[in-house]
Image (cartoon, grey):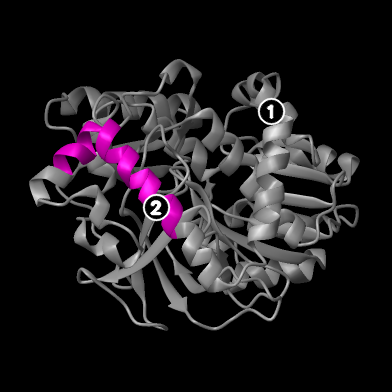
Amino acid sequence: MGYLHILYYLHQLQKNQWLTLPELEKLQHKKLKAIVRHAYQNVKFYHKMFDRWGIKPREIKTKEDLTKLPLITKSDITNSFPNDIVANNIDMERCHNSRTSGSTAEPLTSIFDEKSWDFAKYAVKMRARLACGLNVGDRMICIEASRNDLLQREEKKLGFRIGNLFLKRKYLSVFNDIQDHLPVLTGFRPDAIYGFPSYFKLLAQLVQEKEINSIRPKMFFTSGELLDKATRKAINSVFEAELFDIYGNTEVKEVAWECGEHAGYHINMDSVVVEFIRDGEPVSEGERGQIVITSLHNYAMPLLRYTVGDVGVPTDDPCSCGRGLPLMKVLEGRLIDFVVLPSRVVSPYLLTDILEGIPGIVRYQIVQEKKDKIMVQFIPVKSFSKQIICRQIIEQYQKALGEDIDIKPIIVDALPRDRSGKFRVVISKVSSNQLSF
């Protein structure tokens, strides 16, 4: 795949966004029938599921028909990976792997075929960026949840050169000390910066404290975490820039995005089907529901009725921008805090990245009680040694943070959400007091 394929996909997507809702629904249903048929014929997990529930693929013709199928979870995927959940007619050596960033607390690797990767990783994203006002050739800095060595390795690959087809990009690791980013942020003079809300909240405070006037992008793109009103206000006021929030996940890439009207999030319904479910039933317009996603493009690892763990609100209100892509409102999901140590501030993704590299952990939550004390609650895989997992957590955390930091692994049976329905991956009782506006 390459430039021409991405340009073709982008051309189609640009036209799609101006279709009417009935036209988009017709396109969506066509793609849905194709991916369902493929999943049944080529993916063991779905073949067994359809047969067990007594459902024929031809019965799934519309979004409403999806309610005939059960919901699937991350556990279903990880327990079936790769033999039962990856299509048997796909050459995995020619596929792309995508790993969770650590904001969900449940490690997961997704497989994308080449067409899907070019479509979702580049074309779908670029449609949203152009709609928000970025121009081809603009300069953009991306804050990534990858270590420096991995970023440098990736920059040599074809994918990053394809990414630079539209924008002049630089990539920075969220694992680095944010002060080390200042020379690049001031020297590169980006038109836009893409990253996590928690990172930008810290950057805004640093810019205020140091009275830095040379970081003035015209827009920010936030993703990967819940964007609260205080962080949005801080970014808008400190940088005097427009902020566009994007909703997506590692498993399907971008799902919905804000346009310049900021009336809600446009759902990429030509790329995914989004349902809002409560107690097993679709919610009404304006009601909160669990977000359930069906990918329409990834034939390597299809996801049908996949529960992502976030909450949103569907709306029938049209956007004044004129796009036919429907809106969703109010995202409630991943919350993550920076960690303040005695001598430095650490990205939460350093801590989650370590845990996601330790085998045998089903789900986890990190709580910083004090500057020198971190508690790691986790649910272990039954077949793994709990003692070995605990020892690895302590050794790897102290290697990354320092031996003077008290690391306390705690084995638990469950990690429930809080009363609001949200799940906080990293909770810092120190940064919540120090990083505020």
Front: mark 2 or 1: 2
Residue bearing the label numbered 1: 2
Quadrant in the picture for residue 359? top left
In this picture, residue 425 sits left or right of residue 203? left
Q: Which segment did they paint magenta?
A: 29-49
Image point 28% across, 56% down: which residue?
60
Image point 23% across, 59% down: which residue?
416
In this picture, residue 122 sits left or right of residue 214? left
- Along the line of sight, which residue is nearer the eye, 319 or 408? 319
Q: Residues within 10 Å of mark 1 (few under 14, many from 20)?
A: few
Residue bearing the label numbered 2: 32
Whichever of labels 2 and 1 marks the residue nearer the N terminus, that label is 1
In this picture, residue 255 sits left or right of residue 242? left
Please identify the dominant SS of the magenta region. Answer: helix
Location of residue 389 with respect to 213 vertically, above or below: above
| Mark 2: secondary structure | helix
Image point 19% across, 49% down: which residue?
56
Which dot marks residue 73? none
* Place of residue 79 in the rendered image (x, y in percent of width and height, measured from the top left): 21, 34
Q: Is residue 60 magenta?
A: no
| Mark 1: secondary structure | loop
**Quarter holding the N terminus?**
top right
Task: Give the alpha-carbon distance from disc 2 to disc 1, as whole Å.
Answer: 25 Å
* Place of residue 243 in the rendered image (x, y in percent of width and height, measured from the top left): 71, 65
- Along the line of sight, which residue is nearer the eye, 204 or 400? 204
Whether residue 424 is visible, yes or no, is yes
- Is disc 2 in contact with disc 1, using a CB cutoff of under 8 Å? no
